[in-house]
Image (cartoon, rainbow, N blue to C red):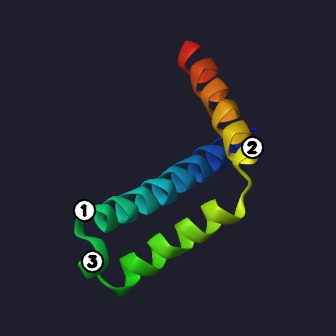
Amino acid sequence: MIFLEKAIRFLRAFVELGFLTVLSIVLIYLILGQGSGVFVTSVADNVIKFSNAVPTSSLVGMAIVLALVYFIMKRK
């Protein structure tokens, strides 16, 4: 059980790190624009393609679920 808890903590930290990395790259792209570099531009293009491919109702649903999870975790 201890191993499982450590693995969950590690995976959660890894996902948070990846999410923060993508958010940082998108922020750099928003600040610098097209002159931000090839890697930053390609990541921003992939994020834009993904957000355009997902229907709006799905994005709203995911946002609601994430907000609920956030508020529940905040109470604990």
Q: Measuring 58% from the left and 27% from the top, which residue is drawn there?
A: 70
Q: Calculate the distance from the C-alpha at mark 1 to the C-alpha at mark 3.
A: 8 Å
- The percent position of residue 17, horizontal first and vertical second, equals 46, 55
Disc assigned to residue 44: none
- As helix, strand or loop, the secondary structure at mark 2 comes to helix
Question: Image height check: is 56 above or below 28?
Answer: above
Amino acid type, residue under disc 2 in the picture: Ser
- Residue 51 lies, in percent from the top left, at 61, 60
Q: Residues within 10 Å of mark 3 (few under 14, many from 20)?
A: some
Q: From the viewer's side, name the closer residue of 62 and 17.
A: 62
**Residue count near mark 1 (Cα–Cα under 10 Å), binned few <14, some 14–19, many ≥20:** few
Task: Work out which residue is located at the far bottom of the displayed protein and give it.
Answer: 38
**SS type, badge 3:** helix
Give the quadrant of the N terminus.
top right
- CA gap, disc 2 to disc 1? 29 Å
Label 2 CA crowd tier, 10 Å (few <14, some 14–19, many 20+): few
Say what amino acid the circle numbered 1 marks.
Ile
Mark toward the start of the polypeptide (2 vs 1): 1
Contact? badges 1 and 3 (CB < 8 Å): yes
